[in-house]
Amino acid sequence: MTPSLDDMYREIILDHYRSPRGKKPLEHSDITTRGQNPSCGDEISLDVEMTDGVVKDVHVNCHGCAISVASGSMLAETVKGRSFEEVRRIAEVVRKMLKGEQVEIPDDLGDIDALKGVRQFPVRIKCALLAWVTLIEGMKSYENGKSEASTTISTEDDEPK
Ligand code: ZN
């Protein structure tokens, strides 16, 4: 039991919520992708600029609860300079961490491990996943030659209510 660690996580999340990263609009974007989490009312849109197969820059615009905004902000901080493959790998780490599965969290993921605290609140897991699911949907469309995508996080997946 380490309440101080929980406090630390909470502080990091609130810091991202209060001053989200990735706020600066892009002059040029290759992918525009939107996501919704109806179970909480979170909405996010991501603009991504690609260069040589890696994410050059990302603009995140999220309206929702503190967790969804903080997770979008962490995404903005983490994905720059990464290939789709790396982004998918990070998203998988985030998903496993949130579901409480055993996972090695790489050192270079910034504040992402602060999302660990969210797993105590199952209804918030979708909030934390929204940005990641949305980005991956956008990447998929991009790989299929489209520049726009949208997705809705299902309210009926495997989460216990
Ligand atoms: Zn939310």
Image: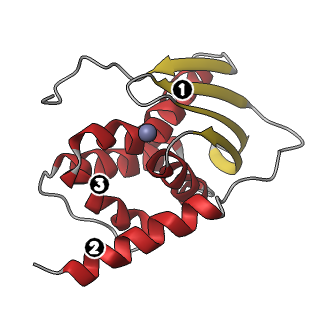
Residue at label 3? 118
Mark 2 secondary-structure assignment: helix
In-front residue for pair 20/27 = 20
Say how the picture is coloured.
secondary structure
Which residue is pictured at 19% across the width and 46% down the height?
99
Quadrant in the rendering for residue 128: top left
- Residue 6 screen position, x and y as percent: 27, 73
In-front residue for pair 52/104 = 104
* Above/below status of 112 relative to 75: below
Q: Earlier in the sequence, mark 2 or mark 3?
A: 2
Residue at label 2? 6
Can you see residue 137?
yes
- Residue 44 screen position, x and y as percent: 59, 34
Marker disc for residue 35? 1
Q: Is residue 30 left or right of residue 153?
A: right
Per the model, the C-alpha gap separating discs 3 and 1 is: 20 Å
